[in-house]
Image (cartoon, grey):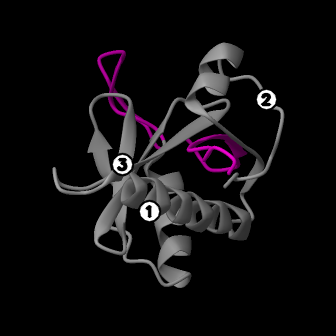
Amino acid sequence: MDETRPFSTFKADFPDDSIEQDDEIVVPAGRNIMEAICLQLKQLGHDAQAPSQHSFYGWSSQFAVGQLKVWLVLQFPDPWLLIAEARGNLLSGRKAKADALQKGVEAIAAALAKEPRIGEVCWMTQEAYESSQGAKAPTNETGG
């Protein structure tokens, strides 16, 4: 079985929606992108939550896959980085999390493909992302 690739980089043609105050970014860019991704997830039948600001650098959301949640965070433009992670409680098994993450990545990949303002989508493992320092990964497949 191939490794799930929960890291995705992509280009997006959305206006900069960051908010600056006194030469400091107080609201990061990307809310409009995350809202578009969540809308596409909802249209695919997933209960994606409205985006919320994730620290000072990004936006997060989550949706259910079975009994688990798939959490996603969007950060850093040019290219954008989207990371997915399966979350459960202490009793959630490793296989259940891996299966939920794979299904979540497939749903996110479908949502990204449906959004016409998003392109050059590239999926990779965390290790591949870190070794390439965000450069284009060797495959565009979601893995699994």
Residue assigned mark 1: 100
In this view, the mark in front (1 or 3): 1
Gap between marks 2 and 3 measured at Cα: 23 Å
**Among the two numbered marks 1 and 3 on one chain, the one whose residue lies closer to the N terminus:** 3
**Among the two numbered marks 2 and 3 on one chain, the one whose residue lies closer to the N terminus:** 3
Tell me which amino acid carries mark 3.
Answer: Ser
Q: Is residue 60 left or right of residue 142?
A: left
Tell me which amino acid carries mark 2.
Answer: Lys
Callout 1 crowding tier (Cα within 10 Å): few <14, some 14–19, many ≥20: many
Residue assigned mark 2: 136
Seen in the picture, residue 87 relative to 135 is either above or below; the reply is below
Q: Are marks 2 and 3 in contact (CB under 8 Å)?
A: no
Q: Quadrant of residue 118?
A: bottom right
Name the quadrant of the C terminus: bottom right
At numbered mark 3, what does the secondary structure look like: helix, strand or loop? strand
Q: Residue at x 32, y 62 (%)?
A: 69
- From the viewer's side, name the closer residue of 98 and 86: 98
At numbered mark 1, what does the secondary structure look like: helix, strand or loop? helix
In this view, the mark in front (2 or 1): 1
Q: Is residue 116 left or right of residue 90?
A: right
Disc number for residue 116: none
Which residue range is magenta in the image? 1-29
Residue assigned mark 3: 60
Residue 134 picture location, percent across and down: 66, 23
Callout 2 crowding tier (Cα within 10 Å): few <14, some 14–19, many ≥20: some
In this view, the mark in front (2 or 3): 2
At numbered mark 2, what does the secondary structure look like: helix, strand or loop? loop
Residue 81 picture location, percent across and down: 57, 36
Residue 86 picture location, percent across and down: 38, 52
